[in-house]
Image (cartoon, rainbow, N blue to C red):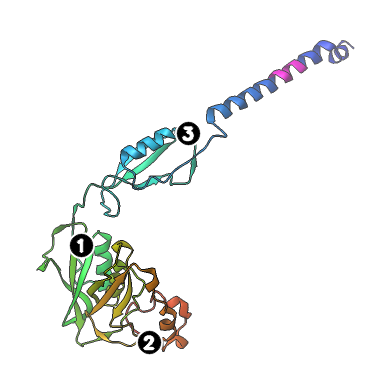
């Protein structure tokens, strides 16, 4: 009977109510403190810091209440200023908390010397990949009689043959001497209009051809935005030039000279009806790496 009176007593329920209020208050206070401590509703959208100098990046991040670490790059990228930011983590546009540490990768101060990869007796395609992946620029392709077709038999720099092992500065131009097999094989001329100079050279190399004479418009304002608006010989689906031949290019930045005959050229492919890919997939000549115009 006394236990029943205890259960219904005012003192018990007042104590329970007080404990509930204290627990709820503690939980509420803890959540409020956590929200304040972790800045739950506060985020900062990272700006794009690429090309910023280190001092500019530091000022920008400090103004946003962020910290940073610096990672020096071992490679030099000529498209970016020396010692400028070339990469960041997290990337631009990501929302982060205040006081977050941002990792900045800086461009090297200049090209460095690296070993020239051994591409002798490798295929042209493999040699292009190996050299360009190490930061070298592939220049002229010279074809010579050699039983191995499309195989590199020698490399040169500034007219002098390179004897491996040797180191050169990244960005150096290396010419390739390539075997043409036992026949005077001819290759077709790819469509180069509207491409930049670098893209045109890369495409010609893929077809075992070279850039010949380059003629710039008299009123050319920005060579970096220049594109091919005329080529000679004209693009052709039939083999026309000997391997290692030259294609002359005319360059401009006048958008009124953009070529509009690309679709007409690709639709004129005499083998388009027998190919297993649609015509619009031929715009990058993915099926012509070997210069074979047969399906």
The local crowd at label 3, few if under 14, some if 14 to 19, many if 20 or more residues have their Cα within 10 Å, is some
Quarter of the image where the C terminus is located = bottom left
Instruction: Report the side of 268 relative to 73 (left or right).
Output: right
> In percent of the image, x 40 and y 39: which residue is there?
102
> In percent of the image, x 18 and y 66: which residue is there?
174
Instruction: Report the side of 258 relative to 2 (left or right).
Output: left
Quarter of the image where the N terminus is located = top right
> In percent of the image, x 34 and y 85: which residue is there?
236
Precedes in sequence: disc 3 or disc 2: 3
Q: Which residues are magenta?
A: 17-22
Residue marked by disc 2: 294
- The tag on residue 98 is 3
Q: Position of residue 205 (x, y in %)?
A: 27, 73
Instruction: Report the side of 51 relative to 114 (left or right).
Output: right
Task: Classify residue 204 by image quadrant.
Answer: bottom left
> In percent of the image, x 23 and y 75: which residue is there?
210
Marks 3 and 2 sit apart, C-alpha to C-alpha, by: 61 Å
Q: Position of residue 136 (x, y in %)?
A: 22, 61
- Under circle 2, the secondary element is loop
Precedes in sequence: disc 1 or disc 3: 3
């Amino acid at each position: 009977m006394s236990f029943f009176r205890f259960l219904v007593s005012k003192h018990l329920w007042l104590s329970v109510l007080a404990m509930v209020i204290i627990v709820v208050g503690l939980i509420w206070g803890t959540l409020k403190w956590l929200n304040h401590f972790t800045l739950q509703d506060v985020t900062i959208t990272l700006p794009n810091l690429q090309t910023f100098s280190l001092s500019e990046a530091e000022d920008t991040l400090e103004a946003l209440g962020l910290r940073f670490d610096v990672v020096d790059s071992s490679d030099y990228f000529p498209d970016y200023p020396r010692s400028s930011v070339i990469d960041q983590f997290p990337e631009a546009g990501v929302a982060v908390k205040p006081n977050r540490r941002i990792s900045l990768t800086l461009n090297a101060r200049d090209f460095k010397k690296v070993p020239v990869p051994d591409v002798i007796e490798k295929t042209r395609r493999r040699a292009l990949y190996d050299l360009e992946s190490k930061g070298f620029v592939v220049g002229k392709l010279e074809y010579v009689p050699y039983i191995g077709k499309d195989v590199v038999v020698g490399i040169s720099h500034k007219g002098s043959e390179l004897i491996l092992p040797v180191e050169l500065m990244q960005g150096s131009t290396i010419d390739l001497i390539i075997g043409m097999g036992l026949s005077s094989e001819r290759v077709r001329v790819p469509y180069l209009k509207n491409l930049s100079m670098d893209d045109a050279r890369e495409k010609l190399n893929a077809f075992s051809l070279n850039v010949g004479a380059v003629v710039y418009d008299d009123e050319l304002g920005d060579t970096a935005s220049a594109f091919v608006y005329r080529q000679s010989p004209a693009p052709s689906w039939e083999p026309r030039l000997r391997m290692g031949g030259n294609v002359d290019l005319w360059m401009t930045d006048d958008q009124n000279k953009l070529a509009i005959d690309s679709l007409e050229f690709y639709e004129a492919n005499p083998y388009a009806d027998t190919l297993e890919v649609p015509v619009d997939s031929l715009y990058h000549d993915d099926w012509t790496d070997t210069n074979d115009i047969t399906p």
